Amino acid sequence: QKEVEQNSGPLSVPEGAIASLNCTYSDRVSQSFFWYRQYSGKSPELIMSIYSNGDKEDGRFTAQLNKASQYVSLLIRDSQPSDSATYLCAVNIPRNRDDKIIFGKGTRLHILP
Amino acid sequence: DAGITQSPRHKVTETGTPVTLRCHQTENHRYMYWYRQDPGHGLRLIHYSYGVKDTDKGEVSDGYSVSRSKTEDFLLTLESATSSQTSVYFCAISAWRDRGDEQYFGPGTRLTVT
């Protein structure tokens, strides 16, 4: 079973609309969840981290976490063409000594002007 | 910006040659990581370090070795490069923020093995 799953997309969203990106994970003991944005040819950039159930808002971005359903999402309000990128979901997997972070394969988002 | 640089940024090498990639950080972070990113596979951990001279394997460590003789430098070596090691390599550090450890990435090295 894959540990972190995302729809690969592409997800096409009109400019100004809300983009909704989803991620599921398999390890119930995970405590930390992250969203990275990666532009083509660039490195992943951390844009949101969330640790508790519920919503966390930062500007146009809202991360949502539901540990019971093992589900984390990212909402982008008022989508802009500059939001077109691949979004990686990452989940912390606790281990005895060193936790590890597992990345999903990413969802490609395309904002239509 | 977590103060991470990688060198070289691009490299083309021939099969069978040794290659060393360097990651340098300026903020004294204890944990450093090497990932490779390939289409269809996403980011995969090669090796990581939890201190000077302390390293451990990740999920795709075969064919790679690492060294960390100083806190600021983490080296990834391909002893004998193969075409399957053509990839983009990212270095990352782990930093405590807010309520947990977060990973920040360097700019990457694009390696082509011909």
Image: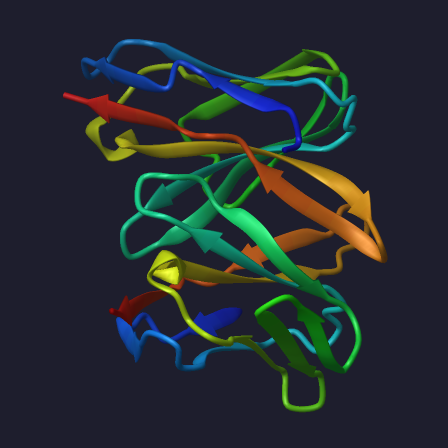
- Tell me, yes or no, if residue A2 can be seen here: no
Q: At 76% across and 40% down in the image, what residue appears?
A: B95
Figure check: B90 above or below A80: above
Q: Is residue B8 left or right of residue A23?
A: left
Q: At 31% across and 46% down in the image, what residue appears?
A: A40
Figure check: B83 above or below B68: below
Q: Position of residue B94 (x, y in %)?
A: 71, 39
Figure check: A42 above or below A32: above
Q: Position of residue A28 (x, y in %)?
A: 70, 78
Q: Is residue A13 left or right of residue A23?
A: left
Q: Position of residue B75 (x, y in %)?
A: 55, 16
- Tell me, yes or no, if residue B107 can be seen here: yes
- Using the rendered view, name the quadrant where residue A16 is placed: bottom left
- Using the rendered view, name the quadrant where residue A94 is placed: bottom right
Q: Indicate how the structure is coloured in the image.
A: rainbow
Q: At 62% across and 54% down in the image, what residue appears?
A: A101
